[in-house]
Structure formats: structure tokens, C-alpha cells
Image (spheres, rainbow, N blue to C red):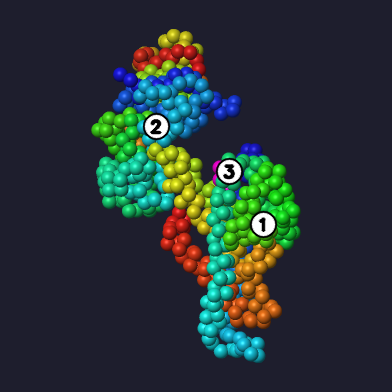
Amino acid sequence: MSAADMTLRAGQSSAILPDRGGVAGALSDLFWKRPRFLLVLMLLPPVLWLGIVYLGSLFALLLQSFFSIDEFSGLINREFTLKTYGELLLPANLDIIMRTITMAACVTIASAIVAFPIAYYAARYARGKWKALFYLGVMLPLWSSYLVKVYAWKLILAKEGILTWFLGKLHLQWLLDAWLSLPIVGGNSLSVSFTGTFIVFVYVWLPFMILPIQASLERVPVNLIEASSDLGANPAQTFRNVLFPLALPGIVAGSIFTFSLTLGDYIIPQIIGTSRLFIGQAVYAHQGTAGNIPLAAAFTVVPIVVMGFYLWGAKRMGAFDAL
Amino acid sequence: MTNAVSFKQVSRHFGSVRAVDAVDLDIGEGEFFAMLGPSGSGKTTCLRLIAGFEQPTSGHIEIFGQQAEGVPPYRRNVNTVFQDYALFPHLNVLDNVSYGLMVKGVGKAERHRDAEAALELVKLPGYGSRRPSQLSGGQRQRVALARALVNKPKVLLLDEPLGALDLKLRENMQEELKSLQKSLGITFVFVTHDQGEALSMANRVAVFDQGKIMQIGSPEDIYQRPNSRFVADFVGSSNVLPPDFVAKHGGERRWASLRPEAVRIVDGEAGALDAIVVSRSYLGGTTRLSLDVDGQRINALVPAGHPLPEEGALIRIGFTPRDLHLMDGAQ
């Protein structure tokens, strides 16, 4: 009988349950017997972090928003009141809220429209090297400083900037002038108009829209597209009835990013745009120079409430049905 | 009579791979046609060429006399039952089944009525409000069938539709598909790698290998008169005998196939062969003996109830010369 035969023959092993021994062995045996113990051990640090540091500070913020400021002394009156929320409804503050929400909605819709074809290409066609290039192309802008990118855009959009120059070369200067002469969206140049703010917002948040859409499109089996076509749906119908509904969770996930990031941002509108404030700038101003922490807190609650309503609406529209 | 589907020298190459290679094929109207072959033999590509998901690299395809090249799937009156059903996960069963009518602009009341009728046809009445994820594999299969049939296709394509079902369900579905095809009169084209399924369901079978059709014929033709070693081997576990062996045992010097059920155990009859029983496999209704005859491996099927020799026993076997089916060529 050969050596190989000896080792493969049943019942010849020295022990049925060989001892592993050591502390590592005992630990892995313990974790195997009590999987919950391992789970608790792994979850404890992040739960402590999220629960105490994150939720705790959010709760403190909420609490602040129910205080009010004494207009004469500038001191915070720690009595429960809805007065600060009442201040939010003053025309000037309501204006800030509406402006921010409108901007966030426009940025979200534009991001979704720009992101979808890119995500579709990446999910359906890009393979191997091209897929790596796609990820690199989408992520690369995130590696450089956000401030650098915003200032770069300020130069691009400035009156003497490359965009104006380029449009001039194309003899399309009149188009830009016509757009800038429009009320609200217009201004002296793109870099001091809401259009400029919008363009930079879309640019900066685009990766956060592309990646979730791409992930959701990757999960749509090709044969569903074929089945739709087989049943007589032309490409537009297939998009409307199959591809879009199945990609909707990804679009909603992406829009949560673009929407909430736009609602909270205070740097982009500060550098590029008009002097009219967005929520983030209002919060910055009230908690800083004005020292009105309660109003700043109340302003901060607005995006949270808006996002809550947004998610509730998305769920009711069936955005998560395909999950 | 026009053919439902007609292939003339159709090829489909993917790079250097010849998935379908110069295939000629005519499928008659109202036929239940099976495409049988191992995986990668080109049968599914042929189906996808009929559906329009693939375009031929060269050659011509006609569907009911009309040229099919360059016609997108959504303009073909052909419907497919996909291998893994491809039901829309975000739609309920009724909306899945009425999808084809919906995209054609049929009104809601009418398409829902037709979809209900189709669900009744596949024995799933009242399942309309469920989600595909709430159905069993067999039920999904029926929904996929209803979703295709509700469009009243001229040709129904089925891509390994029973592959994912368990044995009992598969046998039931085979019967149902057969009777459905008979009552509706629609041309069915059915892709499978299961020779039993192909033989029991189809009027005609095409056996594929490496992008080519090896043989087309009735199930009896394919089973009893295979034209090549490949067909004999693939369709049922036939004994493929080399020319030398055939010549030695009373035949011409050609390759031949011998069905295992044609091999009998005999007692000292003239013309009988000595054989050693190498192994025995119990198959339920029969027992398969693997025999060594002169160094040639031969399988024999012994019906239940007959005496069985032990492994290692020396027995004598016989077969009538007409069971020895001679084959052309030596592929």
C-alpha cells in the first residue's frame, strides 16, 4: 500500500478532534459557539461613537432650537419656547429657506440627468480597464481639495474667465449675455450669479449621484431589458417602464446626497454667487458673529425636516419597491 | 406552406468563436421543435437569433417569409420564455403578464382581462396581485409563459424553461406545455440540453454541436438512427462501437451504435458474447450493467424483475444484428 493510500484511507487519522490549542484557538472556539458575542464586540465602538457623539450632539442642537435669545442683552434664555421657530417664518428667513430648497432641488435634478448616462455606460458597457478608468474619473475630483476646485471654478466662470473667452470664440457671447440679463438666475458674470452657484454645486456633488445610480443599474439583469424588448417595448418604453423604476432606488440614494449636501453647504454660495444667503450661510452667521445659537439651531433643523418629508414622499411614490 | 422560421447559411461569430456556423434550418408552422445540445453548442444563440437579441454575422433568417435581419426584437411577433424567467421584480403578476399589451397601448381594462385569461390558461387564476418574489419557481415559470402567450405570438421561444424545476414539476410542465402547444397551435421552439425532454416533447429535434446542426429528425430518428457518434453518444447513453469491433461481430467495418436496452443476457445461445460485469447501477425501473466485452465497454439495461448478475461475474450477452445501427462518417 502506497503512502498516499495510507493517508486517504478512512479511520486512520490519529484523532477525530485534534486539539488546536493556544489562546487564539480558544478565542475562535468561543466566537464560533457564541456568534452574538462577536457581533456585540464588533458593533460596540461604532454604536458608542454614533450614539453618544453624533446623536447626542444632534439632540443638543434640537434642544437649543427651543431656546430663545434675549434681544436686549444678547443672552440665551433657557426656557422652552417656539419663538425661535416663529422667527424662521419671517419673510427674510423664509426667503433663505425657499432659495436653498429650490437650489437643492435644481441641483439634484440636474445631477440625476447628467449622472444617468455616465452611470449607464459604466454599468452596461465599461469592462476591465475602462471600468477602472471610470472609477478613477469619477473619484479623482474628490481627491483634490474642495476649496481649490471651487476657486478654480470662480476663475472659469469669471467675466475674464475661460468660459467667456471660449463662448466669444464661438460667437456665442450674446447667448451668455442674454442669460445673464435674466432676473434671479442672471447677474454681472456667471461667477456672481445663481447660475454659477448651480453649476459648481452640480460639479462638486456629481460623483455622489453617479456611484449609487451605477450600483443600482449593475443590479438590473440584462435579461429584464431583453424581456421588455421581446414583449414589444421600444427602447424609450423599456427605459420608462423597466430601467428607470429599477434604477430609482439608486437615483433616490444619490439625490439624498446631492440634496442634503446642497442644503447644508455654506462655502460654495459664499465664493460663487450673489450676496443673498443660503441656509448654511445663515447658520454660520447666526452662530458666529450674531451669537444667536437658537436661531442657528432652528435653521439647521430645516434640512432635517425637509429630508424627512423627501424620503417619506419617495417611499410613497414607490422608490424603494424594487429593493 | 411557409415555414415559421427559416435559416439559410446563418452564422454568428463572436470574435474568433463560431457560436453558430453556417446553419440551415426550417421550422414548420405549428411544430414543436427542440434544439438539443451540450452547453456552448450554439442552440441558445440560434434562439436569440430568432428572438432578435443577436444579429447574424452572415446568412439569412426569415420568420413567416419575412426577412428578420435588422428587425429589432420589439418589432417581431415572437415571444420568449427566458431561462430564469426574467419577470419584472417591481411589477405584480398581473402587470407582468399584461406588460406586452400595455406597451402596445391596449387599455387597462382590456389588458387586465386578457392577462387574467392567460393566467387561467397556465393555471394561476387569482395570482395577479402577488409579486414575483412571492412565487415558487414553478409558479414563476407559469407567469413567464402567460406573459409571453398573452401577446398571441406566432412563434414562442423557450430557453431551457424547465431547467430550474425539480423532477416532478418538470414532468408535469412537460405534459402541460405539450397540450398547450397542441391546443394553441403556436409554433414552439424549445432549447434544452436534456435529451429526455427533447425526445418526449418535440415533433422534431435538431442536435447541435460546436455551432453546427449534427442531425435533424423526429425523436425516433434521432434516438434509433443517429447519424454520427456525437448524436449517438449525446442522445441517450448509447454504446458507440468502433469499426473493428463491429466487423468482428458480424457487421460492416463501420462505426455503429447499440442501444443499452437492446443488449440481452442470454444462456449459451449461438452468436453470444462473453462479458464481465464491471459495475451495477440501480436506476429504479431498470438496472444498468457496465460490461467488459473483449476490452470494449458496453452498457446494458436490465428491466426490474429480471435476475441480476453480481459484479465481477462472467455472463453471456447477445443482440440482434438489426439493433446494430451503422453510422455514416466517423465524427
Secondary structure at numbered mark 2 = loop
Residue that label 1 marks: A190
**2 vs 1, front mark:** 1
Relative height, residue A166 to residue A194 (above, below):
above
Front-lying residue, A113 or A173: A173
Which comes sooner in the sequence, label 3 or label 1?
A: 3
Q: Is residue A123 one of those drawn in magenta?
A: yes
Where does residue B220 sit, x and y in percent of width and height?
A: 34, 22
Q: Are dots 2 and 3 on a single chain?
A: no
Q: Read off the magenta span.
A: A119-124
Secondary structure at numbered mark 1 = helix
Residue that label 3 marks: A121
Distance, label 2 to label 3, CA atoms, is 27 Å
Q: Residues within 10 Å of mark 3 (few under 14, many from 20)?
A: some
Name the amino acid type tagged 2.
Arg
**3 vs 1, front mark:** 1
Name the amino acid type tagged 1.
Leu
Residue that label 2 marks: B76
Q: Is residue B138 one of those drawn in magenta?
A: no
